[in-house]
Image (spheres, rainbow, N blue to C red):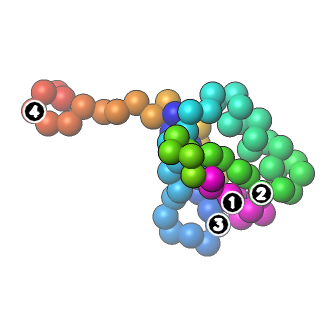
């Protein structure tokens, strides 16, 4: 699953591929916003991504499906 995080005062988005279920990811985001604690997500390679809750602009939780590329994608 793909999680896209918009951070305030940062032009680029953070995109994290993770094995988390969408419900679990949404719960982690809500908890970080409610408690003011950092959002912590582990990606599918075992790396930990930590974003301070005060700097979160938006979070998109999606399926992360690959789009077809090339002549056969039409």
Q: Quadrant of residue 56?
A: bottom right
Give the class, few, some or many, for how many residues have Cα within 10 Å of label 2's Cα (few <14, many ≥20): some
User: Mark 1 highlights which residue?
Assistant: 51
The residue sitting at 71% across, 51% down in the picture is: 40
For the point 83% across and 44% down, the residue is 31
Tell me the crowding category of disc 3: few under 14, some 14 to 19, or many 20 or more residues within 10 angstroms, Cα based.
few
Query: Which quadrant is home to the C terminus?
Result: top left
According to the picture, the residue beneath numbered tag 4 turns out to be: 71
Q: Which residue is mark 2?
A: 38
Of labels 3 and 1, the one closer to you: 1
Contact, mark 1 vs mark 2 (Cβ under 8 Å): yes
The numbered mark, 2 or 4, whose residue comes first in the sequence reads 2
Please identify the quarter of the rendering in which residue 67 is found: top left
**Mark 3 or mark 2: which comes first in sequence?**
3
Cα separation, mark 1 vs mark 2, equals 5 Å
Q: Earlier in the sequence, mark 1 or mark 4?
A: 1
| Magenta span of residues | 48-56
Q: Are marks 4 and 3 in contact (CB under 8 Å)?
A: no
> Label 3's element?
loop
> Does 29 lie within the magenta span?
no
Q: Which residue is mark 3?
A: 8
Of circles 2 and 4, the one toward us is 2
| Up/down of 13 relative to 24, above or below | below
Within 10 angstroms of label 4, few (less than 14), some, or many (20 or more) residues?
few
| Residue 10 in view, yes or no | yes
Q: CA distance from mark 2 to mark 4?
A: 43 Å
Q: Nearer the viewer, mark 1 or mark 4?
A: 1
């Amino acid at each position: 699953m793909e999680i896209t995080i918009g951070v305030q005062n940062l032009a680029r988005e953070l995109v994290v591929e993770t094995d988390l279920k969408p419900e679990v990811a949404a719960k982690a985001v809500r908890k970080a916003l409610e408690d003011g604690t950092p959002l912590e997500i582990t990606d599918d390679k075992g790396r930990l991504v930590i974003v301070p809750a005060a700097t979160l602009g938006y979070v998109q939780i999606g399926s992360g499906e690959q789009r077809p590329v090339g002549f056969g994608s039409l």
